[in-house]
Image (cartoon, rainbow, N blue to C red):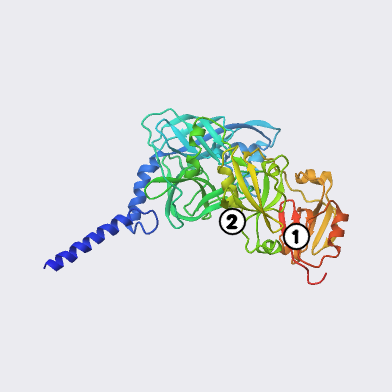
Amino acid sequence: MRRKIVLFGISLLAGLVFFSLAYSQDDISSYSGSGIEDAVINVAKTAGRAVVSISTEHTEKIGTIGKRYCFTSPFDSPPFAQDDPFRKYFEDFLGGGPNREYKLRGLGSGVIIDPRGYILTNQHVVEGADKVTVTLSDGRDFKAVIKGQDQRSDLAIIQISAENLPVATLGDSSNIKIGQWVIAIGNPFAFAMQNPEPTVTVGVISALHRSLNRTLGQGRDYNDLIQTDAAINPGNSGGPLVNLRGEVVGINVAIFTTSGGYQGVGFAVPIDSAKKILSQLIEGKKITYGWLGVTIQDMTDELAKYFGLPDKKGALVVSVLENSPAEKAGMKESDIIRQFDNKPINGVRDLLNLIGKLDVGRKVKVVVLRDKKEVALEAEIAEKPDNVEGKAVVPEETSGNWRGLEVQELTPDIASRLGVAVKNGVVVVDVEPGTPADDAGIVVGDIILEINKQPVKNVSDYEKATKALKTDTLIKLYRGYVLIKKANSN
């Protein structure tokens, strides 16, 4: 009898320990069946109360009167497609007319993070707004003021004057895991739903440390995003991504879509990134970021082999900007950055994350590989200046041919149309499919600056450099290095 009691006690204790451990985790093993359901219901009741709908207005001169009736967001689809019958109705009935001033409206979400009325949202939700209105989950409306905003992180703080505000709890995004359950809360299509209560969608963290290029990111720097399959739709931007404990782990920022609607891939800014700049945003201060002044790219297996490296770790320097910290430190093109601030660099993301977190004026040690030898440098981090990017235009005239490439001399007019700050080189005007150039990833509009580290200032230099080549060739493009394999016959 005593033995049975002891065994029962051990089993009961083990069960209690397991139950305690299970409910201390945030991943899929934390809950089962009704446990997950109860957790989602609880989050909707608690964290959901702190989620708000944000509507904005701004005045803009436009020529197409149909835009007057749309709600806009950088991640929304166009208001009227070319074949949309409503487009023709508005154009025929209202007419195009001359440029006039119209009030454009935008929608987004936000989350209350402080009882003083501070609301965290995306910068793109309130960018350029003349008027910001916040609707609470209980239906109350308030005018809001923009306290601070930062385009690079796409975060902003707005404030309302209200009492008895529900406040969300900010969690820790450094320990989240792929496969962990998360809940996206926001107000998608709120103008159509006519309901202040936020929408709750459930999914998992699909990936971590995702990056969006500047085209997909609408010109912003998205380098360390959380990816989730919890449905995020237009109007969700600025709303929180929370764990099953109701703690905010991210701010929903974008969707990847080919249709303008949800397709199973959404992104959120980690809450730890937001917490680092919250006080500055509240105070209305400019957010400064570290800057080295180099254009870099990841190494590939082919490039590692060309440079004689045992692996493809590091960030390859494509260009060094004039008067930048990198230039002053003695960094050169085709250097491979392997260590930065005594930390190993596996790729571009590692370097960008480290630089962006450093204070302006901080001196750091940089170890680069140059001609297969380690070179130690010291750079003083500066404040990152604003960047201006141009649009690519395909030139019309062609000349030259090598390994599937046709090129043309880069004239000042072409450089201007391409939006590049180089005066010499040749521009790619055609790439034959299935050729070594095509396999290397070269595309029309690329600008060739060097061949095997020899400058290419014009078509004559290009033809001389390629005339007798029979081996794999290192090509320096304006956007980075590629390796063109030798052709079957040359």
Type of the residue with mark 1: Leu
Report, in whole angstroms, how far the alpha carbon at label 1 lies from the one at label 2: 21 Å
Q: Is residue 428 above or below residue 436?
A: above
Image point (83%, 44%), residue name: 412
Q: How many marks?
A: 2
Mark 2 or mark 1, which is nearer the start of the sequence?
A: 2
Q: Is residue 456 above or below residue 93?
A: below
Label 1 neighbour load within 10 Å: few <14, some 14-19, many 20+: many
Secondary structure of the residue carrying numbered label 1: strand
- Check the image and name the residue furthest to the left: 1
Q: Nearer the viewer, residue 365 or 326?
A: 365
- Check the image and name the residue furthest to the top: 161
Image point (70%, 34%), residue name: 97
Quadrant for the C terminus, please: bottom right
Residue 220's label in the rendered image is none
Q: Position of residue 259 (x, y in %)?
A: 58, 53
Type of the residue with mark 2: Asn
- Check the image and name the residue furthest to the right: 460
Q: Nearer the viewer, residue 137 or 68?
A: 137
The reply, left or right, for residue 243 in relation to residue 104 is left
Disc 2 designates what residue?
A: 346
Q: Position of residue 460 (x, y in %)?
A: 88, 55
- Residue 345 sits in quarter: bottom right
Secondary structure of the residue carrying numbered label 2: loop
- Residue 150 sits in quarter: top right
Residue 474's label in the rendered image is 1
The reply, left or right, for residue 431 in relation to residue 250 is right
